[in-house]
Amino acid sequence: MVLQFTSEQHLDDGVLEREFTLGEIPGILWTPASAPAPLILLGHPPLGLLKMYPRLVARARHAAADGFAAATIELPGSGERPRWAAAEHARADLRRAIEAGEPVSDEIIDALILPLVDKAVPEWQAALDALLSLPEIGGPVGYSGGVISIGVRLVVVEPRIVAAGFFAGSFVPRAMFEEARQVTIPLHVLLQWDDEGNDRQAALDLFDAFGSKEKTLHANMGGHTGVPQFAGDTAAQFFTRHLK
């Protein structure tokens, strides 16, 4: 797939923001003035780049201030990408379970997450191929964000990623625990202790399963969107330590 830039703008802090397409996949690349720069891939939930943009650009600016480029792509079935019938059905089942106050079954979680992982990870790898061919992008590469199962699969199959910061807070299929044991790179896992949509014990069990010798769990009180500023600063220090 060929990466084509479709727009660009200079942000107030000197960061160059460029939208691109990779085949039919939309994405955004942010680069600092210093080049070539190490790259951080910004993971996010399947809510669409437009909705996620304020949070993504804030993370990208933070990364650029530390000398990193950052990039993200639209997930399958999200944003302006074609809807995906199986995913829509799984989301409807999830909503019904939550509205009825019922536990979310393993079957619903598997149907919701596993096909998304299977589709998204090869697209992230294709994006990485294209981004690393740009003169303003160097190595090494980090991954930051969620969906955590996408991050787990990606760092297992992608040797160019040397450190990852995962956001706990999404449903995790049981099959991903075995893949987590294959993760060996340094990890920084952010957990919001009172995340209303997160199975806290599952997040703790997944952290325990990671095979990395260096892994840190940073837990904070508060809900899903209540991540304190200092938690972001700590994550930034993690990437500075491993990507520079």
Image (cartoon, helix red, strand yellow):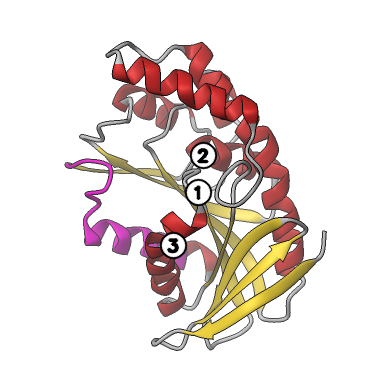
- Residue 159 shows in the view: no
Q: Over which residues does the magenta segment extend?
A: 222-240
Element type at marker 1?
loop
Judge whether 91 appears above or below 102 on screen. below
Type of residue at label 1? Pro
The image shows residue 40 at horizontal and vertical percentages of: 54, 63
225 drawn magenta: yes
Type of residue at label 2? Ser
Label 2–label 1 contact, CB within 8 A:
yes
- The residue that mark 1 highlights is 186
Type of residue at label 3? Tyr
Q: Give left or right: position of 224 versus 53.
A: left
The image shows residue 206 at horizontal and vertical percentages of: 44, 28
Q: Name the chief secondary structure element in magenta.
A: helix
The one of 57 and 49 positioned closer to us in this rendering:
49
Label 3–label 2 contact, CB within 8 A:
no
Residue extending farthest to the left is: 221
- Give the CA distance from mark 3 to mark 1: 27 Å
- The residue that mark 3 highlights is 53
Label count reads 3
Say which quarter of the image contains residue 66: bottom left
The one of 47 and 133 positioned closer to us in this rendering:
47
The residue at the point 50 percent across, 17 percent down is 108
- Give the CA distance from mark 2 to mark 1: 6 Å
Q: In the image, which disc is placed on residue 212?
A: 2
Dot 3 or dot 2: first in sequence order is 3
Element type at marker 3?
helix
Q: Give left or right: position of 112 versus 156.
A: left
